Image: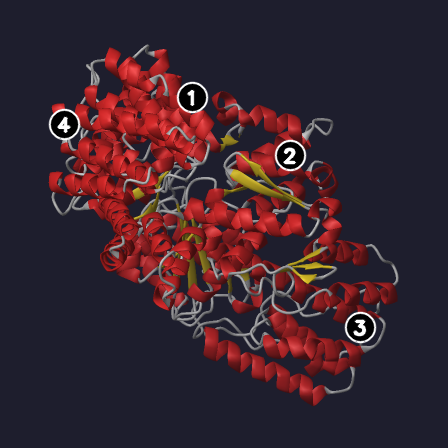
Amino acid sequence: MEFRLLGTVCVDTQTGPLPLGPAKRRSLLAALLLRANTPVSVARLSDCLWDDTPPLHARTVVQGHVSRLRALLTGADAEMYGVELATLGDAYMLRVPEALLDSQRFEELLMLAREQRSPSDSVLILKEALSLWEGPALTGTYPSAPLQAAAHALEESRLTTVEQLAHAYAVLGEHHRAAAVLRAEAVAHPLRESLAAALMTALHRSGRQSEAVDCFHRTRRLLADELGIGPGRELADAYAQILRGDPEPAPDLPGRTTVGDGAGAGTPAGTGAGTPGGAPGLHAHHTDLLPRAPRGFQGRAAELAALSRAAAGEAPVCLLTGPAGVGKTALALHWARRAPAAFPDGRLFADLRGFGDTGEPTPLEVLREFLLALGVAPRRVPESAQAAAALFRSLTDRRSLLVVLDNARDSAQVRPLLPGGTDCVTLVTSRHRLDGLIASDAARPVPLDVLEPPDGTALLAGVLGEERVLAEPVAARRLAELCGGLPLALRVTAARLAGRPHRTLAGTADELADERSRLTYLDVEDTGVSAALRLTVQQLPPDAVHHFARLGHHPGSHFDPYTAAALAGSDPVVATAALERLAAAHLVSETGPGRWVLHDLVRLYARGLDPASGPDALVGVLDHCIATALAAADTAEPGGEPCFVLPEDYRRPTAVRDFTDRAEAMNWLATEREDLSLAAAAARGAGLDDRAWRIILLQWPYVVWRVRDGWVPMLELALDAAVARSDPYAESRVRNLLGWVLSEEGRTAEAEAMLEPSPGLARRAGDRLGEATALINLAIVQAEQGGLDEALEGCGQAVALAGKERDAHTEMLALQHLARMQLAAGRPQDALDSARTAFDLGPEHEEAARRVLLLTVSGEAHLALGTQREGIRLLDLAAAEAERDGYDEGAVRSLEALLRVTSGTEYVRRYEQAVRRLTDGGP
């Protein structure tokens, strides 16, 4: 058995490749293999299968694909190879020996090649590594952002390997072979300068100078036309070497060039390059004020490319923004030092200290440093900021300079420091968005987010050494995740470990896992996450700080203005303004319209600003959850009896979200499912059990709609909360829903045990409608267990109870199930009468699922009575309504009944589409 990612994603076996099926199943396999032997969350898998917000049934689709993939592997005797697709809570893990995965073997061969002393041995190993590729990586998968990024990373590794093979050939003196290896890749990747430079060098050394020069000019024109930039350092150096006719370098110093970084490289001495119009008092020299580039820089390929694109315009201002500690300065300096040849007149740098304790430099202080660096005599530097700025713009008018302005507080601080030349590039970094600079100077924003776990792990390795990280790879990845991908946190962690060589990474991860002390651990002397965040927060107005502190007590992962208002005791309008201020300071991030998140470490810092407000904030947000879920349930299922009375100390929010229709309400329940679960768990942990079971039970419309979607653990938490309060009303209500879910999952014995106490509990609480619902659910299980007579009697009692309470909704529910049981008992006319009675009780817009099920049972009753035409009409109507409303389970049920009496191709097609929607998430 062999798993392939380097080409079409597949599983090869002795009998041929496994039939993986649709692209999304292949994508799921790829996502699991890319993180082989590591748990992959359902959320991460969903991101790999859908571009935008996953559909409501995403979890069901993922479960369906996992089930089919597991069946395929089992059928291929995967266990014999040590392969297992395991379920770990809310995640899945594909256990697979590394030897069975082509991408792992590829990496192992690359490591082996690096260890070889003989270039001929390196050539053999690198050729074997490249032979594993059978086409573009991850072919056949859905083009989601995570999978495309992974495919790009794999392709980057392949191209680097091609360049290494060419270099090995060059060391052997086989330059014609190096050129042959490089040419195809250079054609396929014409903008990759390192390939073009290597090909030029190989052609030159094999005596094909004209082809080498032609390659340079072709690449130069393409860079100018496509990206608006000139050749980089590597390409320019290769061209200069060809023009000089340099001999081939010694084998032990491959690729070494003699072109320097300074001004005048490649130009005749004494030309005065860089002197703009003979400005008085100005010296011709290359200026470089850049600080030392940070060591251990990792990743950021997309952002580096974005900076290069942003810098390609005319007189561009590039704006690198992100939260404290995310690595803006490191990225700016890394990018600035990559291609010194792009800025022949020099590079200027100033730390504007917009978020420091030491005070900001004045514009005149910064401009004076710039002017002196450009060669202006001290006595010629103007004494006013306006005059100095004018002189700076004049001197840079005909220059090609890079100006890096680090840690800008606002746009006004930046504007006087902008150069005047159309060939100058200004790179500004800030914790704020600086929208004013975008508006006034067309600044091009490049937002910077946290590092992905592989890059975070690589950063640790850059400080601690690869051996130490490779010795504990799982702990290293866990450390990267606990640091939230924040480079500052990772560097502080690495600094602590570097000073303690005998300390394990696993032990450090255990310490960081404790949220109470995590921020303390991530501070070293005056450097650390808390210090960086403090400098950002102290710039905010008091109202924004108040909302920020309360957000730290949010039990969920996402929040909207209503949630923020409930936490802070404000209203949504005020909360929205505060969130905008926090977003501008990169303390919160907007993941979608009106939907925000806090980084884990930022959340811990915010929580520590006002710890005493935690209990009050929690009650506020829990009651907000109850109020909003009540509104959603009422909109999704109008006419349904409320699940409960409100707690005695319930605090109604100042404003509750309004839902315009059922679709919007159901979408909210689906989107907020995880956060509602987290809120219920937080309520349970805080002893607020009266809130916990209510928050969970209010999700019943979505539970009914997606019943086989893993609801049992959350409902069990609700049951624990109800039992803890010795509340028979709550316990009965929770048992009703949980028992029904268990029965729908096919766990009938568990369902019966769960439901048996429920009618008695409801009677004790005086809850007649709850008793009726309990009798219905118990009857469903009894019928499945073979006790049809008991089930009929129970449903009859439920009809009577609901009728006495004059609750049409519950009476319809009882009649619907009574009709189904009468049909099973061979009494189709009684079933039809019960269904008609149910229809008479409710309006045409009654709950969509119930109407579909009543139409289905009516159709089946007509078929049993011999009135086939009417039966088919009703079943067709049920299927059409289910398809229209997105009730796929109802569509499957009605179409299954139709296909028992007719084999029409249209019904077969619709049935297959409905089944596919349930399992594959699309038509």
- Which label lies toward us, 4 or 1? 4
Vertical comparison of 132 with 841: above or below: below
**Disc 1 residue type?**
Ala
Measure the C-alpha gap from mark 2 to mark 4. 62 Å
Q: Are marks 4 and 1 in contact (CB under 8 Å)?
A: no
Compare residues 41 and 79 and report the one nearer the observer.
79
Q: Between disc 4 and disc 3, whose residue precedes?
A: 3
Q: Is residue 452 left or right of residue 625?
A: right
Residue 76 coordinates in the image, percent (x, y): 68, 52
Label of residue 803 in the image:
4
> Which residue bears the numbered disc 2?
475
Compare residues 170 and 382 and report the one nearer the observer.
170
**Disc 4 residue type?**
Gly
> Which residue bears the numbered disc 1?
753
Measure the C-alpha gap from mark 2 to mark 1. 43 Å
Q: Between disc 4 and disc 1, whose residue precedes?
A: 1
- Which label lies toward us, 3 or 1? 1
Q: Secondary structure at mark 4?
A: helix
Residue 350 coordinates in the image, percent (x, y): 45, 50
